[in-house]
């Protein structure tokens, strides 16, 4: 597979809604990924090309969920990630989590830690209420603006 072919594939998917393309040609397999957000995938390749496989991956934060529908119905307050990093529920391994589902929290109370660039950032509640749902697993990477907690205001 020559370099020109690879660059042609990259140029074809730039600006489209395609997230990932895997191609195997002449015994060489390449995978091209691009972030496109929670949108539908466009197939720019002819359907007669059996060696091209196009996949769409939807993360749990992109897919509408039962919790998202419940949040809209009940008007829960949403705590979102203010930065990109790794989500931690406890201050250290083996320590109890800051909060559990069902806990009542106060404004300013630490809910979790997000590690970014080796800095531990405490994420605090900006409202008094009850934790209805914790949306992220311990140790999971989070994106800016990703929903972390649903809180029922009190």
Image (cartoon, grey):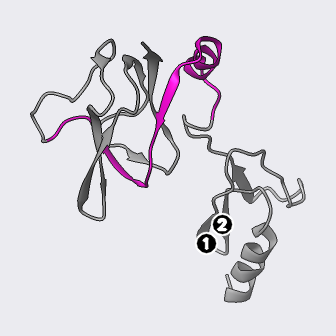
The residue shown at (40%, 27%) is 127
Q: Classify residue 131 by image quadrant.
A: top left
Q: Is residue 27 above or below residue 36?
A: below
The residue shown at (62%, 38%) is 62
Residue 88 visible at all: no
x then y, percent, for residue 136: 40, 34
Q: Is residue 46 magenta?
A: no
Circle 2 SS class: strand
Mark 2 vs mark 1: in front: 2
Residue 49 visible at all: yes
Circle number at residue 27? 1
Circle 1 SS class: loop
- Which residues are the magenta region? 63-91
Quadrant that contains the N terminus: bottom right
Quadrant that contains the C terminus: top left
x then y, percent, for residue 83: 43, 54
Rounded to the nearest angstrom, the CA distance separating label 2 from label 1 is: 6 Å
In terms of depth relative to the viewer, which is nearer, 104 or 2? 104
x then y, percent, for residue 121: 28, 51
Do the numbered discs 2 and 1 sit on residues whose CB atoms are within 8 Å? yes
Q: Is residue 73 magenta?
A: yes
Circle number at residue 24? 2
Q: Is residue 57 above or below residue 118?
A: above
Q: Classify residue 81 by image quadrant.
A: top left
In terms of depth relative to the viewer, which is nearer, 46 or 8? 8
């Amino acid at each position: 597979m020559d370099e020109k072919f690879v660059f042609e594939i990259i140029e074809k998917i730039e600006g489209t809604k395609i997230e990932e393309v895997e191609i195997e040609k002449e015994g060489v397999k390449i995978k091209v990924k691009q972030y496109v957000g929670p949108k539908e995938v466009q197939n720019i390749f002819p359907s007669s090309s059996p060696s091209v496989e196009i996949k769409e991956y939807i993360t749990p934060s992109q897919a509408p969920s039962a919790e998202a529908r419940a949040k809209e119905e009940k008007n829960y307050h949403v705590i979102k990630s203010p930065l990109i990093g790794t989500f931690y529920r406890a201050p250290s391994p083996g320590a109890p989590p800051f909060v559990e589902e069902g806990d009542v929290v106060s404004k300013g109370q630490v809910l979790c830690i997000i590690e970014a660039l080796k800095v531990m950032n405490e994420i605090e509640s900006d409202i008094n209420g009850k934790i209805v749902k914790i949306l992220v697993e311990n140790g999971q990477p989070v994106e800016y603006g990703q929903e972390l907690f649903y809180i029922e205001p009190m």
